[in-house]
Image: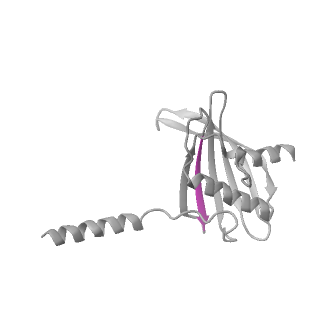
């Protein structure tokens, strides 16, 4: 009987692990037909904003961004998108892709918090209209801008505004 219980426990453990969503491919390794959607929510003492970035791969990688205007939904008991404002798009160089991959690597380290500004990021890799990989991160370290070789999403927004 103990062997049967152990076998069932192992079966459940391996099945649960197999159903975990895959990690996103990243920016440089994103297959040409796939897109990477990133929801970026940032809040702090003096700011609160939500954005959606759509990264496309291929011969000419690009990013498009929109600011999301949120409203409280009493029915859903959460904030929902009321409207969006397209902010623009940018061509991405190979160095940008490398630095964006460094951004994901930084978030995967689960940086320590302590800052009153909190960034929440939800990555979805979409292939053939279906989400094939997901990752979510919360960063309360306020240190992403101090990282050498890392391209932050807020820096991409600044580039779009200067364009």
Q: Position of residue 28 (x, y in %)?
A: 70, 66
**Which residue is painted at 54% across and 56% down in the image?**
135
**Which residue is painted at 66% across and 31% down in the image?**
47
Q: Position of residue 34 (x, y in %)?
A: 65, 67
Image quadrant where residue 100 sits: bottom right
The N terminus appears in which quarter of the rendering? Answer: bottom left
**Which residue is painted at 59% across and 55% down in the image?**
123
Q: Position of residue 84 (x, y in %)?
A: 69, 42
Image quadrant where residue 12 sits: bottom left
Q: Position of residue 74 (x, y in %)?
A: 48, 32
Q: Is 161 situated left or right of 73 in this image?
A: right
State the residue lying farthest toward the left: 1
**Which residue is painted at 63% across and 46% down in the image?**
40
Q: Is 90 situated left or right of 17 in this image?
A: right
Q: Of residues 107 and 30, which is closer to you in this image?
A: 107
Inspect the magenta stretch and tell me whether residue 51 lies in it: no
- Magenta part of the chain: 119-127
Inspect the magenta stretch and tell me whether residue 125 lies in it: yes
């Amino acid at each position: 009987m103990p062997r049967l219980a152990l076998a069932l426990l192992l079966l459940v453990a391996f099945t649960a692990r197999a159903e975990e969503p895959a990690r996103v491919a990243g920016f440089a390794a994103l297959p040409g037909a796939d897109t990477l959607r990133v929801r970026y929510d940032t809040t702090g003492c003096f700011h609160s904003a939500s954005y959606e970035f759509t990264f496309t791969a291929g011969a000419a990688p690009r990013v498009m961004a929109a600011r999301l205007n949120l409203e409280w939904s009493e029915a859903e008991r959460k904030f929902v998108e009321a409207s969006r404002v397209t902010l623009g798009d940018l061509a991405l160089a190979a160095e940008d892709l490398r630095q964006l991959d460094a951004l994901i690597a930084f978030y995967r380290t689960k940086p320590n918090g302590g800052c009153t500004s909190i960034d929440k990021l939800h990555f979805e890799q979409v292939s053939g209209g279906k989400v094939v990989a997901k990752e979510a991160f919360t960063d309360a370290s306020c240190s992403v801008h101090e990282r050498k070789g890392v391209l932050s999403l807020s820096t991409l927004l600044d580039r779009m505004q200067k364009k």
